[in-house]
Amino acid sequence: MYDAVLEHLNPKNSFSGKQMNINVMPYANVKYCIRLLPKITGWEGIAELFIICYDIPEAAFWKARVKEYFAARKFILNEFERILKTEAKVFSATGTDEHLWKMAGADKLKPYGDTLPLLQLAKLTGQYPFDLGRKPYGEIFSLLAQLKAQNDVEMEYQKLHKK
């Protein structure tokens, strides 16, 4: 009965006296949370998500008020939905060669989807990919978006140059 009312609380970025800033969270943590969300089946998974997102100790999660939990939960879900939409928009493939990419075996790369972008950045910057995963999500996303834009322009240039 209470769930029906609590589900309609406005999102609030506050839980146990802390706020979540997805752009400051480590890139690896954001990607881990995205993978974790569909797998959450119980309170332990929910607690893990809140502990990561709000950087709180486990005891703080269990002591929180129900109203605070539902408002923060709605905020978390909205934030991850927002960044997933943004990533899909920024990183979407616009080339006509996408079918060739799939024929070449692109599905084999899916298990490495979180770390392959870090590997590309690491090659450019001379850093260890997993060190980059500890950098803030906002910084890594910005660099990946720039890299994607540059690659798109270079690919179009090559097509024009061949004509």
Image (spheres, grey):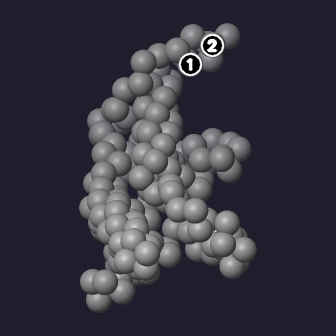
Q: CA distance from mark 2 to mark 1?
A: 6 Å
Q: Which residue is mark 1?
A: 7
Q: Position of residue 9 (x, y in %)?
A: 47, 16
Given the image, on which type of amino acid does mark 1 rest?
Glu
Q: Does residue 8 appear in the picture of this structure?
A: yes
Q: Nearer the viewer, residue 51 or 102?
A: 102
The quadrant of the rendering that contains the C terminus is: bottom left
Density class for disc 1 (Cα within 10 Å; few <14, some 14-19, many ≥20) is some
Q: Nearer the viewer, residue 159 or 3?
A: 159
Q: Position of residue 102 (x, y in %)?
A: 68, 70
Given the image, on which type of amino acid does mark 2 rest?
Ala
Quarter-of-image position of residue 148: bottom left
The quadrant of the rendering that contains the N terminus is: top right
In percent of the image, x 52 and y 14: which residue is there?
Answer: 8
Q: Residue furthest front?
A: 163
Q: Position of residue 13 (x, y in %)?
A: 34, 32
Specify whether 16 is left or right of 35: left
Specify whether 10 is left or right of 43: left
Q: Nearer the viewer, residue 107 or 158?
A: 158
Q: Which residue is mark 2?
A: 4
Density class for disc 2 (Cα within 10 Å; few <14, some 14-19, many ≥20) is few
Quarter-of-image position of residue 137: bottom left
Q: Nearer the viewer, residue 62 or 146?
A: 146
Specify whether 106 is left or right of 11: right
